[in-house]
Image (cartoon, rainbow, N blue to C red):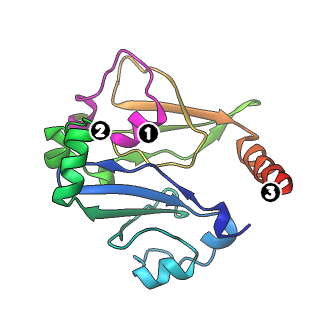
Amino acid sequence: MSAHDIYYSDKYYDSVYEFRHVILPKNIANQVPRRKLLSESEWRNLGVQQSRGWVHYMYHEPEPHILLFRRPITNTTSQLLQSVINIKIPFYFSVLMSVKDIYYSEKYCDSQYEYRHVILPKAIAKTMDRSKLLTEKECRALGVTQSPGWVHYMLHGPEPHILLFRRPLNAQSTKQASRVATATNA
């Protein structure tokens, strides 16, 4: 695996910052010092490629191979969000959004799936649509960061601030196999 195997999320926003997360393959993630924020030169040396201005702002304890980045929204970015894309930045993000307050359970399995639950701060959970399952993009907009393949599969009525996720047991090996196939066909 190489820098070509690094996954870059879509950007998501609050009223002050644009965010993105970067998922490193295991061979690169093993080079990342634990519990240390990386300087731009350090993350670039790992093979992370993104425009200037991004800051590695938080260590993500549940999944240390996920690097969390942010950069201030400029007037140009804000105008683009408001006019071209027509995204209205929700007020609650500026007040309540705190990725640190999101709890990620350990993973648990049955014969078909790997599961985990994510507990949102109740203030954030109150702003989401509790009548439907959330897409990956909607989960990320709430601040949930986890590796690709996790699906919000069930509503937990008694405690709607708990999101239930699952993915097939072979999700990681299937993903790696598709990368090999893509590289072979290229």
Task: Give the amino acid at mark 2.
Answer: Ile
SS class of the residue under badge 1?
strand
Label 1 sits on what residue type?
Val
Left or right of 163, for residue 112:
right
Find residue 148 and report its image quarter: top right
- Circle 3 SS class: helix
Q: Which of the two labelled residues, at mark 2 and mark 1, occupies the earlier sequence position? A: 2
Mark seen at residue 118: 1
Report the magenta residues as a range: 123-141
Dot 2: few (<14), some (14–19), or many (≥20) neighbours within 10 Å? Answer: few
Q: Horizontal and vertical percent for residue 40?
A: 41, 80
Kindly identify the amino acid type of the residue bearing the numbered disc 3: Ala
Res. 62 visible in picture: yes
Q: On residue 183, which mark appears?
A: 3
Disc 3 crowd, CA 10 A, few/some/many (<14, 14-19, 20+): few
Q: Earlier in the sequence, mark 3 or mark 1?
A: 1
Which residue lies at the image location 43% right of the left edge and 37% below the top edge?
A: 137
- Residue 134 drawn above or below residue 4: above
